[in-house]
Image (cartoon, rainbow, N blue to C red):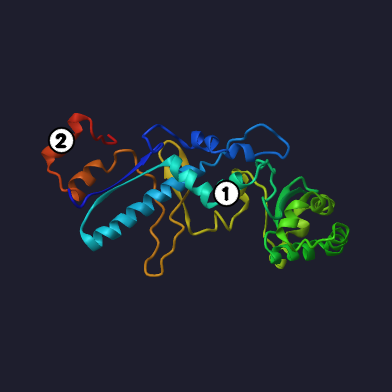
Amino acid sequence: RADLIMVTLKGDRRGGPEVDYTVNPSLGIPHITGAEGSTEPVANALPAWDCVAGNMVVSSLLAAERDRLRTGRGQDVEFALKDAAAAVIGHLGMIGEATIYDQQRGKSGNSVYGAYGQDFECACGGRVVVIGLTLRQWRGLLKATDKAQEIKNLEQKLNLSLDDEGYRWEHRHEINDIFRSWFAQRKISDFEKSFNDFGLTWSRFRTTKEAITEDKDTFTDNPMFETLNFEGIGQYMVPRSPLEFSNYDPLPAQKPPKLGQHTEEILGDIMKLGSGEIGALFDSGTVGSSK
């Protein structure tokens, strides 16, 4: 059909097999992930390239559909998972960095690369991360912890201004030494309200199970989630789309469809194939159903 739009996601651009967990190490990400000083590569538990590629599938489909509305033409769209990942690291400046500088970027633990952001253990045994990326965030952190004078003393010692994010990154260890004892002497509950009142950018470390139980604003009190029952499994929260459009009410959360659940509906109602054509596709094994 001349008006058909089809998006094909390949592994690599030559059609070879790739998945997130092979693309990630091939581009060097595990060598900049993990504890500072470690030489062991660390794979990321979050399949970032799958997430990026999935959104690219949707955006390319919508772009092709917009073109079809204007021209009536369908088209094929192809891209590779590995190319999507390589493009992203290029957009992030990582290719330029690796090309220009002789030394490979090392691991930096939980520090925010290039600026200031660090995690600290608190007296309650919990751990938080605080961000001083922008000047507003940085100065707010100094006010909330009453560490402005100690930071000023460090600036005088170094003969520079830590208002510069590059210097904050370069001297992060000295800065960490100033903040570490402050957090070690306090429980998270001691400073949680004041941090929020100051408008700091910060968060506590939680497991997913802890987050679902404790962070009610994100989960149980959030209208984005609805608790659904799954036969043979039980009940748990399912999200609807986080997007909110001013002209439409959000669609409710739905259970994920079973593989092949809508095959006949799509072939018949959308592609307008006859029962004989649909039957032939099933008989040849080209398509299948959830039954």
Q: Dot 2: within a 10 Å radius of its alpha carbon, few (fewer than 14), some, or many (20 or more) residues?
A: some
Q: Is residue 236 visible?
A: no
Going by the numbered disc 2, the residue's amino acid type is Gly
In the picture of the structure, the residue carrying the numbered disc 2 is 279
Q: Dot 1: within a 10 Å radius of its alpha carbon, few (fewer than 14), some, or many (20 or more) residues?
A: few
Q: Nearer the viewer, mark 2 or mark 1?
A: 1
Q: Nearer the viewer, residue 156 or 245?
A: 156
In the picture of the structure, the residue carrying the numbered disc 1 is 96
Q: Nearer the viewer, residue 265 or 112?
A: 112
Q: Residue at x 40, y 32 (%)?
A: 17
Q: Is residue 238 visible?
A: yes
Q: Which circle marks residue 73 in the picture?
A: none
Q: Residue at x 71, y 59 (%)?
A: 165
The answer to whether residue 280 is left or right of residue 204 is: left
Quadrant in the picture for the C terminus = top left
Relative to 86, residue 281 above or below: above
Q: Position of residue 90 (x, y in %)?
A: 52, 49
